[in-house]
Image (tube, rainbow, N blue to C red):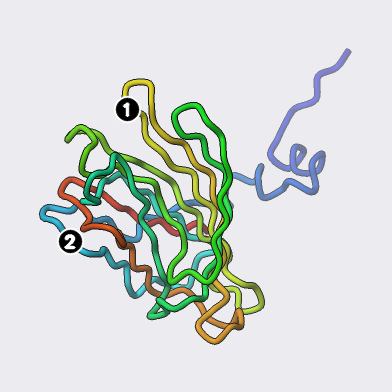
Amino acid sequence: MSVSRLSRQSIQSGFPKQQSIWDGLTQPSAMDALGAVTVTSAVSNVVFSSIPSTYTHLQLRVSGRDARASSVDDALFMYFNTDNTAHYTAHGLYGYNGSASTDYRTNQTGAYNVRVTAATAPSSLMGSGIVDILDYTNVNKYKTIRTLSGYDNNGTGDVEFYSAMWIGSSGTPADVVSTITIWGPNGNIQPNSSLALYGIK
């Protein structure tokens, strides 16, 4: 039995639909850091502006807390560009202290963002989440947002999966996301909270 000599060309010939994977030259899809903020004193919002339009999707990563009084947790919200009017909807599933439930929101002034901890939570406890903003430059699609977030407080806590939509400032999908503003509607974002934005090619 003879053994054939393998080469890059022979591998490519055997897998014609996957040449970009095997050619050793083509760059795979990647994530680029676009900006990061670590809050050093309480702020009402965090803004990522001048977002380049050269990516397919955006991803926001958050670890934080806000100052909502008499509560262990709260939700941060976000709006796009300058549109903080009732152009956002959301629905979600969540588990809170062992109980499952659902949520549905319409005519919101911002998209649901991340579940964070609040005033009565231990000072070292943060909520965290990952937010995907899909097809943010596509002028033929309403912008959709996917969020997974939560926190653990020594066996109690919250985990949430949300989907949200922005219908655009004029009610059409023509707007491209160039600015993201994240805020806590019930209290300022607290020190040591961190937020980072990535572009996905």
Q: Identify the residue position indicated by label 2 in the image.
A: 43
The quadrant in which residue 181 appears is bottom left
| Residue located at (51% from left, 35% from top) | 95
The type of residue carrying mark 1 is Asn
Query: Callout 1 environment at 10 Å: few (<14), some (14 to 19), or many (20+)?
Result: some
Total labels: the figure holds 2
Q: Position of residue 16 (x, y in %)?
A: 80, 47
| Residue at the extreme left | 41
Q: Identify the residue position indicated by label 1 in the image.
A: 153
Q: Nearer the viewer, residue 85 or 147?
A: 85
Q: Position of residue 80 (x, y in %)?
A: 42, 72
| Residue located at (40% from left, 54% from top) | 60
**Quadrant of the frame with the N terminus:** top right
| Residue located at (43% from left, 68% from top) | 110
Where 166 sits versus 139, above or below? above
Where 144 sits versus 91, above or below? below
